[in-house]
Structures are given as C-alpha cells and as structure tokens.
Image (cartoon, rainbow, N blue to C red):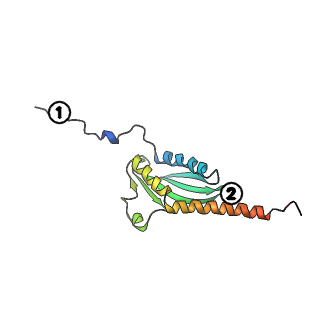
Amino acid sequence: MATDISNLWPLDAIHVDVRTPRDILLMQTGQLQQATKGLLESQVHTTEAKEGVSHRFDIIAPALGNYRHSVMTVKHSRDMPYPTTISSIADTLSERMSTDINRQYTEEDFIERVREILGSVQVVAVIQSLLARIQSAKSASVADAPSEEQ
C-alpha cells in the first residue's frame, strides 16, 4: 500500500519575486543620495568574466572631484546569482578568512549582510569623513571669496 507523501519543498523559502544582488544594490544607490541631500552618491559597477560576475559598490563625492571609495564587492557565478560572496571594508580578519560568513545563499541572507555592511562603523566613518571634507571645502571657498567691501 502506497503512503501519501506531503509536499517536501520548503514553501516558506520559495518566493517568485526574488531580486538579483545587482538589483538590490542599485536600490540602495538612490537612498544614500537622498539621505545626504545629494552630497554623496553611490554607484554599482558590474563586470562579467569567465569566472563569474562582480558588482563593486562605491560611494562617490561629486564635490570632491568625484572622489570614489569602494565599500563592497559582490561576486557570484554567471548563471546563478545565489549564492553570493561579499568582501567589504567592514570585514574583520577572521571574516576575510572564512567563506561561511561571507557567503549568502538566499536573497534574505544577502539583504541582511548588505544592511550590516552599510550600517557598519567603517562605512559610517567613510560617509562622515566625506561629508566633513565637503563641508570644509565649502567653508574654505566662502572664506576665500572676495568680500563686497573691498
């Protein structure tokens, strides 16, 4: 007698609206510009090679001659966007040595890791440093401007 086998698929993990890592990173580019009132921008630069796809996420300061600071690099195979491997300025030495910490198998894992990186003290320090340099440059240009009294 045959026994009824219930559905063995992990239905809670199967979503039809899964986004690619690149799409998720692109969604964040406008968020930084909005938060900094246009003083900082971010950009995703994608390269494709035989070994796979690489997405570099940079913060850009247009007022500083388009100064660019790389925050993270996401890699995955050409045919399968998951799992991803992320290396970032927020990685500790032990994280750099471990493939488990830097590998994200699902969209949810990827989003969580990107959230951790963007909120890390290292990334916040980059943002604050760039904003301080922009403010300093603005102050210096105002101080150097000739006054109307002369």
Rendered-image quadrant of the N terminus: top left
- Please tell me which residue is depicted at 51% across the width and 49% down the height of the picture: 25
Residue extending farthest to the top is 1
SS of the residue at dot 2?
helix
The answer to whether 6 is drawn above or below residue 35 in the figure is above
Residue 63: mark: 2
Q: Residues within 10 Å of mark 1 (few under 14, many from 20)?
A: few
Q: Nearer the viewer, residue 81 or 39?
A: 39
Residue extending farthest to the right is 150
Q: Disc 2 residue type?
A: Ala
Compared across the picture, whether 46 is left or right of 147 comes to left
Rendered-image quadrant of the C terminus: bottom right
SS of the residue at dot 1?
loop
Mark 2 or 1, closer to the camera: 2
Residue extending farthest to the bottom is 93
Give the residue number, with chain letter if any, for mark 1.
Answer: 4
- Separation of disc 2 and disc 1 at Cα? 66 Å
Q: Nearer the viewer, residue 24 or 145?
A: 145
The answer to whether 87 is drawn above or below residue 111 in the figure is below
Of mark 2 and mark 1, the one earlier in the sequence is 1
From the top left corner, tell me how far across and down residue 80 is, in percent: 41, 47
Q: Disc 1 residue type?
A: Asp
- Please tell me which residue is depicted at 60% across the width and 48% down the height of the picture: 34
From the top left corner, tell me how far across and down residue 16 is, in percent: 40, 37
User: Can see residue 39?
Assistant: yes
Residue extending farthest to the front is 149
Mark 2 and 1 residues: CB-CB less than 8 Å, in contact?
Answer: no
Compared across the picture, whether 125 is left or right of 86 comes to right
Q: Nearer the viewer, residue 124 or 67?
A: 124
Compared across the picture, whether 13 is left or right of 32 comes to left
Q: Quadrant of residue 100?
A: bottom left
The answer to whether 4 is drawn above or below residue 50 in the figure is above
